[in-house]
Image (cartoon, rainbow, N blue to C red):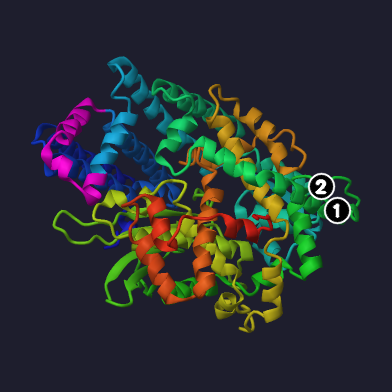
Amino acid sequence: MLHDYTAIDAGTIRRATDETLTAANELIDAATSGPATYDGVIARLDRAMELLAEAYGSGPFLARAHPDADVRDMASACEEELDKWSSSVVFRRDVYDAVEAFAATPEAEALGGERGRSLAMWRRDLRRAGHHLDEDRRRELEGLQQRLIELQVAFGRNLAEWEDHIDVPAERLAGMSDDYIERLEPGTEPGTYRITMAYPDYLPYMDEGADRELRRQLQHRFWNRAADENTALLAEAVEIRASMAALLGKRTWAEHAMEVKMADPEAVGAFYGRLTDPLTRRGREELHELAALAAADGVDEVRSWDWAYYDTLQRKRDYGIDPTEVAAYFPLDRVMEGILSITSDVFGLEYRTVDEPRAWHPDVTAYEVVDAAGGETIGWFYADLFPREGKFGHAACFPLAPGGLDPDGHRRRPVAAVLANFTKPTDEAPSLLKHDEAVTLFHEFGHVLHHLLARPELARFGAFGAEWDFVEAPSQIMENWMWEPGVLRRFAAHHETGAPIPPDLVERLVAARDQNVALKTLRQIFLGELDLALHASERPPNPNDAYRSTWDRTLLPFHEGTHFPAGFGHLMGGYDAGYYGYLWAKVFGDDMFSMFTAEGILDPRVGGRYRREILEPGSSRDAIDHLRAFLGRDPDPGFFLRRIGIDVT
């Protein structure tokens, strides 16, 4: 069932965390002192980790969402404790000895399925914890891991709590819609408006704000969030990772980190190598077009604070697409209805709004997800979609309760939460999403479906246990439905008149999908190469040096005086030596969507096969086996490459 988050305060989080750690320690002690059997060792270890996953969702998760700063602080401290405890288990020599003792038994040799996979993964993780090292080096490795967790928590907290703004008079808001201006808070001086670094303030201005100098100033502030604090934290983290890799006999952190992923550094290099030359040629052509548009405004060189603005103007000129006009057809409630309707039809689901969600904030809505065929409740998810002070600043899905079977063999019902920062509705206007924001919501809902529909035996093999360069694929595939005319016409309707989105606007929107796709993909590659510059080198550079050395990939001049890596949360949020995974997983997502384009965009037979072969297995088998089972062949990047105009003959 759902937690009563209204009853949670700092004290309850503290007590629940202490109780969880006590129970988990008892399980570990029993696993290391009991019989060398599956139930005596592996089952107890897995159950201990499940307890921490359950505790995270009921308390520490609130570090990203609770309106009370004291609760957030306690939740953050408890999250750090849980993370440290989780990472410490594989460093324990008694755990290693217990697992190896069981691994040597006939019972272990006969294990198959998820139980055998769990044993294999415990052995892998214990090896990666350095149990082949002498005691001093193993303890050094554990100390480095604990320090790394502290740095990661501090980095995220600094970004969540960072506040900055620029107050501007009305005349500097030229080009912005009345709705945007009305939603801005007043500035300190009479007649001024405050643009903060929150996404609903910052991104629309970068897309449509006509004041070029203000765009430059805003980007400068945004790319300097927590610059001093987080640059130092990131630099230390990168050095620690390199030291850990060296202790484990790996040349770089990337070699170590990618051992548990689909790719390796060489494969990623080859992947990028196949893309960069044709994308760069096309990107220069795209930039030339943007430069011609900018020249009409007297701009002699398109800069990083210009390109989104001129991309928007180009979209209006060439396709008649005004993002504000398009947003009028994507009120948030209609987009949510569209997501639920489409996934109901394709995947055989029903959704019910929870009347009293007892969530952490009044803005939060909760939904029950039901299997349409059998009427079984599958799980629940929360939607917390508007910005507020101290809240997580991006869009993401968080697992709040794991699935799998409980000790009595009954299926647990998983819970997830989507956090986002869309424009909040007012008494005068609803929340209107730009098309790319609607795409983001579809993307995050892919994570929700993956988490809720996974049906492993063991909780550890839920969706978020998949290889980190595959975990985005079930979200990338969801984005494709937001570009299908037949799908858009199902739910996109004008927020004032109720009129469905005009067919010609849909056609123009879809036609404009790949406008400047090379520049956008090159930016993705820049982010991946920045990550690898820090983590695929034996002597990692300073974060800002890595930023400068990889920036040329974007084809735009460098923005001097900025410290972009300090705000690049992925580098400290689990995507270290893994950011390439977004583009890597998009290739898989597009390839999987080719099954729908071939057999029916909303075909429930294809959807049922996708649910069975991709979503329901969770991470109970290797991702490549998911793909082969669903596709009926090895994955092929051709669909993705052809879509963005790269010749694959």
Q: In the rendered structure, which disc, 1 or 2, sits on the residue that comes first in sequence? A: 1
The answer to whether any part of residue 264 appears in the image is: yes
Image quadrant assignment for residue 232: top right
Q: Residue type at mark 2?
A: Val
User: Which residue is denoted by mark 1 in the rendering?
Assistant: 294
Task: Specify whether 254 is left or right of 565.
Answer: left
User: Which residue is denoted by mark 2 in the rendering?
Assistant: 302
Indicate whether residue 123 is drawn in magenta: no
Q: Which residues are magenta?
A: 92-117
Q: Quadrant of the C terminus?
A: bottom right
Compared with residue 135, is residue 343 higher up or lower down, i.e. above or below? below
Tell me, yes or no, whether the two marked residues, 1 and 2, touch with CB atoms within 8 Å.
yes
Q: Position of residue 275 (x, y in %)?
A: 65, 47
Secondary structure mostly seen in the magenta stretch: helix
Depth check: give the residue in front, 407 or 11. Answer: 407
Q: Residue type at mark 1?
A: Ala
For the view shown, which residue lies furthest in the left direction?
Answer: 35
* Kind of element beneath mark 1: helix
Depth check: give the residue in front, 616 or 594. Answer: 594
Indicate whether residue 113 is drawn in magenta: yes
